[in-house]
């Protein structure tokens, strides 16, 4: 399995989370909520894909 896409998703997720945290004062509240929800969903998907990749490595 090619893990390049999963690694890219993980890096982009962490960068989006960092942007939300570092610029939390200058982001409007409606946009901040949407960004936080999308970062949480992306983090969950990244975690699931990472765990799936680790379990399927032995196969």
Image: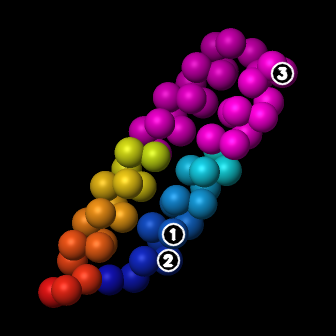
User: Where is 21 relative to 16, above or below?
Assistant: above
Q: Secondary structure at mark 1?
A: helix
Q: Residues within 10 Å of mark 1 (few under 14, many from 20)?
A: some
Q: Residue at x 63, y 41 (%)?
A: 17
Q: Secondary structure at mark 2?
A: helix
Contact (Cβ within 8 Å) of mark 2 with mark 1: yes
**Residue marked by disc 1:** 7
Distance (Cα) linking label 2 and label 3: 33 Å
In the rendered structure, which segment of residues is drawn in magenta? Answer: 17-42
Q: How many marks?
A: 3
Q: Residues within 10 Å of mark 2 (few under 14, many from 20)?
A: few
16 or 54, which lies in front? Answer: 54
Q: Residue at x 25, y 83 (%)?
A: 57
Q: Residues within 10 Å of mark 3 (few under 14, many from 20)?
A: few
Mark 2 or mark 3: whose residue is earlier in sequence: 2
Q: How is the image coloured?
A: rainbow
Q: Residue at x 70, y 33 (%)?
A: 21
**Residue marked by disc 3:** 26
Residue 4 is labelled as 2
Q: Can you tell which quarter of the image residue 59 is in?
A: bottom left
Question: In this view, which residue lies farthest toward the right?
Answer: 26
């Amino acid at each position: 399995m090619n893990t390049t896409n999963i690694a890219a998703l993980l890096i982009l997720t962490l960068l989006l989370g960092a942007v939300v945290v570092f610029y939390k004062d200058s982001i409007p509240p409606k946009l901040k909520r949407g960004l936080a929800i999308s970062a949480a969903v992306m983090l969950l998907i990244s975690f699931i894909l990472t765990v799936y990749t680790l379990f399927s490595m032995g196969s």
